[in-house]
Amino acid sequence: MASDMPTPLHLHVPEPTGRPGQATDFSYLRVSAAGEVPKPAVDIKAAHTGTMAWKLIRVLDEQGVAVGPWAPKVEPEDLKRGMRAMLRTRAFDARMMIAQRQKKISFYMQALGEEAVSVAHAQALRPGDMNFPSYRQQGLLLVRDDIDVAELMCQLLSNERDPLRGRQLPVMYSYKRAGFFSISGNLATQFVQAVGWAMASAIRGDTKIASGWIGDGSTAEADFHNALTFAHVYRAPVILNVVNNQWAISTFQAIAGGEGTTFAARGVGAGIASLRVDGNDFLAVLSASRWAAERARLNLGPTLIEWVTYRAGAHSTSDDPTRYRPADDWTRFPLGDPVARLKQHLIGLGAWSEEEHERTRKHFDDEMAAALKEASKSGSLQDGHIPPLATMFEDVYEVMPAHLHEQMRQAAEHGEHRP
Ligand SMILES: Cc1ncc(C[n+]2csc(CCOP(=O)(O)OP(=O)(O)O)c2C)c(N)n1
Ligand SMILES: [Mg+2]
């Protein structure tokens, strides 16, 4: 009988709907209308955030008008600051991409298309709060007036003026005073570190909160799940950001588990209040970030936020995305470009113009060109203007132990014999 025939088992391997030469069917994103998703009180129980974790919180409608319960109270001047910071980040990235092509730096990673996530989030944090960023949150730094972009470039050049003295890969910045923890190349460690830091802040009775950053692909790491458990159990004052930019190098987000569920839903399952938010909607990012920050500050516990966005550029300068996805995908991404959307909104408010936009863009282009010129004066990896070898042994211990002294001596000896 047919019913006795055992069914051969097989596995499901998710595939993106678009590959080079085809168009992506973006209906998989499940986009809600602006204003559709309710905004709950900050003390909502995690189990009741299912709607917010499955739908998509959006504020800006198709005409660029802010609608619905998540529309934040914000001065146009703060939105203009956000616009400038996004344009500044874009200009920095563009200049560094050129510098890499000119072989002035060895490697670069841009945030093109995702700038609203880090720039608007930064506006919800306070001095002393600590971000544990991944490598695509340079907007957290470029939003600040007190960050010297020439110094950032010196880090990319690994030159004599590199504040990290050549110890980090380019783009792995570290800025304690800017609430920007040293970037670790080991993905997902940011989440356990952020939760641990937030717990320490609470144990000390401090008022500072932490914000951790991870990509869609990196949620497949065990650290993601470990962090969620600790954050939930101790109600750590932390914001857990999952930047779902649809890709992890050449791997589609469904391979990390985004098919048929959402990354935000992981949080609900772990007992954490969770939101799924349009990451290209500057106002939605600001509003959701404020909501999560308030929860943390009131001891209401962690919030996980999935930011739905699109990595418009290559993963890094070592990647060629035309090999694995349609080259024009970004132009058809349903959530558009965060810069264009905030621009439309600001022009609608009468607070911005095409002319001011162009002038601002040009201003930051000039700023970046001048900064690169200045940074290049301190040399680069190529011309050997790098920190002396002996500095490698410094800053590890307060007092250098004997074995490091010995290694430093051996390194110097070896250095002398180098051809
Ligand atoms: C633990 C670990 N595994 C693998 C890598 C190599 N790697 C670097 S970036 C990357 C893709 C990460 O994708 P995602 O988390 O979605 O972040 P995105 O690059 O899209 O911002 C991988 C696999 C790594 N750095 N660390
Ligand atoms: Mg990704």
Image (tube, rainbow, N blue to C red):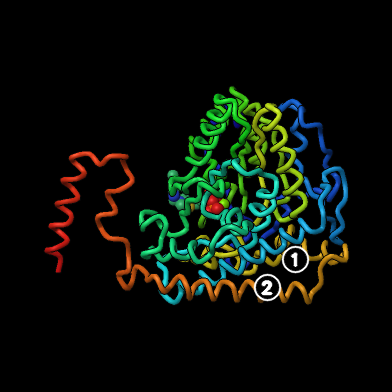
In-image side of 63 versus 188 (left or right): right
Residue beneath label 2, please? 361
**Identity of the residue drawn at 72% across and 46% down:** 277
- Mark 1 closeness class: few <14, some 14–19, many ≥20 residues within 10 Å: some
Question: Closer to us: mark 2 or mark 1?
Answer: 2
**Kind of residue at disc 1:** Ala
Query: Does label 2 or label 1 sit earlier along the sequence?
Result: 1
Foreground pick, 395 / 170: 395
Report the number of discs: 2
The quarter of the image holding the C terminus is bottom left
Residue beneath label 1, please? 340
Between the residue at mark 2 and the residue at mark 1, the CA separation in whole angstroms equals 13 Å
**Kind of residue at disc 2:** Arg
Q: Quadrant of residue 61?
A: bottom right
Residue 365, how many percent across, how many down? 61, 74
166, above or below 306, in the image: below
Q: Secondary structure at mark 2?
A: helix
Q: Quadrant of residue 231?
A: top right
The yes-or-no answer for disc 2 within 8 Å of ligand 1 is no
In-image side of 154 versus 167 (left or right): right
Residue 284, how many percent across, how many down? 76, 49
**Identity of the residue drawn at 65% across and 64% down:** 329
Q: Secondary structure at mark 1?
A: helix
Residue 13: tell me if it is visible. no
In-image side of 245 versus 77 (left or right): left
Residue 242, how many percent across, how many down? 61, 44
Foreground pick, 312 / 369: 369
The quarter of the image holding the N terminus is top right
Q: Residue furthest front?
A: 399
**Identity of the residue drawn at 31% across and 40% down:** 397
Residue 114, how many percent across, how many down? 64, 57
